[in-house]
Image (cartoon, rainbow, N blue to C red):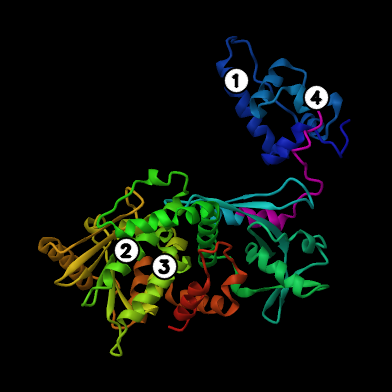
Amino acid sequence: MVSRAAPSLFRVLAQQRRWSTWEVFVTHFDKAARALVKNAPSTTVRTPSVGRRTFDRWYSGDWYGQPRGTFTCRVLEDMFGFPVEELFRPAPAVLRPTESPLGRDQVRAAQAIERSWATSRMSLTTASGFGWDTWELAGRRTFDGTSLAVRMHLLEPPDGGLLRLGLDDDPSLQGSLRPAGAGALIGVLPSHSGPELYVMDAGVARSHLLRAPGADALPIPDAYRLDDLTYGLIWAAANLDAALLADDWQLDAEEPLLTAYLDVPRTAPSRSLLPELTAIGSSWVGSSFCAQHIQRKLESASGTPVFWTREQFGEEAAGWLLWKHKIQYVHTLQERFATSAGPSLSRAFCIPEVAVKDSDQYELLLLLLAVACMEMHDIVVHVCDDASMSSLEGFVLIPGQSAIIANWVRAEGLWYADATSARAQLRSYADAVQYAAEQTIAKGNSARERLQALAAYFGVDWTWFTRRCRTLAAAGIDGLVRPRSRLMSNAELETTLRFVGSL
């Protein structure tokens, strides 16, 4: 008999595949057996089967119940990829078995996260009381993909508007909240309709516990409920943060080289210039350079510029909310062109219906927040849905004078930057921005009206959206997810959430 302290490799692999009951295991065994019989050279081979008692012996590690039939062994080896003699030996130490099964509510919570968001994958640890689980956050178009270390805990019922994670149930929590590495706590509140989930940044949780030694519970605001808004913010911030941290040394080292390009009239460097950068790192470089290029060219402008941008998806627009250089860029523009008469700047987007249909709700919420950020800074946003204009490069038009081309979104290289005063091009750009203003989806005489119209185009419930932004801003976005990169900040995002919540 294999001891409980050293379960067989068969048992551990079956647990990992969630084949730990006879009813589930036998369906996979029968499928594998039929496939082998079909391809067997002899027509006299019979399809083997596994009875309940046989499986129970295999799973418990009973030596006398181990398979001895040649074809049965072949089926098991085909299923698991290990020789039978290894399958029924003690599992290697690197495959730590579950000492006590995860609670039903935690398992259902992990399943709910995977069902709700296609870019999520939960990997529950096989070691009870050891380490952290993994929450993988995949990219769709631009993001490289990353993962967060997570721990799931049952929450106590709400008390005075706050949920509480009881520390008495897990005394190891305080010691396991490490200062390094990105992580999150997921609170699970069981309910008849399924688990309600709440998220808190692990670093913030650690700071809270350090400030309150001896605390018996960790409070979690109701605003941190996991839904499309909070998931979108976690997904974007975690992906941007991980990539920029990975690229930090190279971004710092190459800054003088990139700055030198500002003195060149027309530039379009290949991605091979910085081949080791992540996709997000390349986007950050392009965005940062284009912002500097535009600001330098606008120094000599004598008119009010009109902007055209290429962002169509949440991944592309998230930088407006979280990257420091973009935040500073928007603030600089507002200060330069602010008037007492009201908004003087405008920015046009092309977001065709096909892009909306190809986006999940959390992606559209990121895009809506990015537009709200601009409206908050007195930049009137126009949104056209004409797909034929999707290929138009990003530009800044100074009517009747010149146009500044600055494009990094979906660019072939790191960026494309230029300037022109050719009349044909100026006329083409002027026609584009006029068309966007006249045909805008975001119609209205105020920021509220324009954003509400855009929310309707995205299929976003405006009342829910403004309420969630308001409560999340009041709770503080840092508690949900806190970037670690020096190139990011939550300040603008929180201000934008507060702005939307006030509408």
Q: Is residue 52 visible?
A: no
Q: Mark 1 sits on what residue?
A: 36
Q: Identify the residue position indicated by label 3 in the image.
A: 326
Residue that label 4 marks: 66
Q: 258 or 373, which is in the foreground?
A: 258
**In the image, residue 83 lies at what x, y percent?**
71, 22
Q: Please name the residue that numbered disc 2 is placed on.
A: 293
Contact between marks 3 and 2 (CB within 8 A): the answer is no
**In screen coordinates, is 195 left or right of 280?**
right
Q: CA distance from mark 3 to mark 1?
A: 59 Å
| Residue 304 on image: x %, y % | 23, 77
What are the residue bounds of the magenta stretch? 89-111
**Is 90 covered by the magenta stretch?**
yes
* Amino acid on which the number 2 mark rests in the picture: His
Which badge, 3 or 1, comes first in the chain's sequence?
A: 1
In three-dimensional space, the C-alpha distance between marks 4 and 3, rounded to whole angstroms, equals 64 Å
Of the numbered discs 3 and 2, the one sitting upstream in the chain is: 2
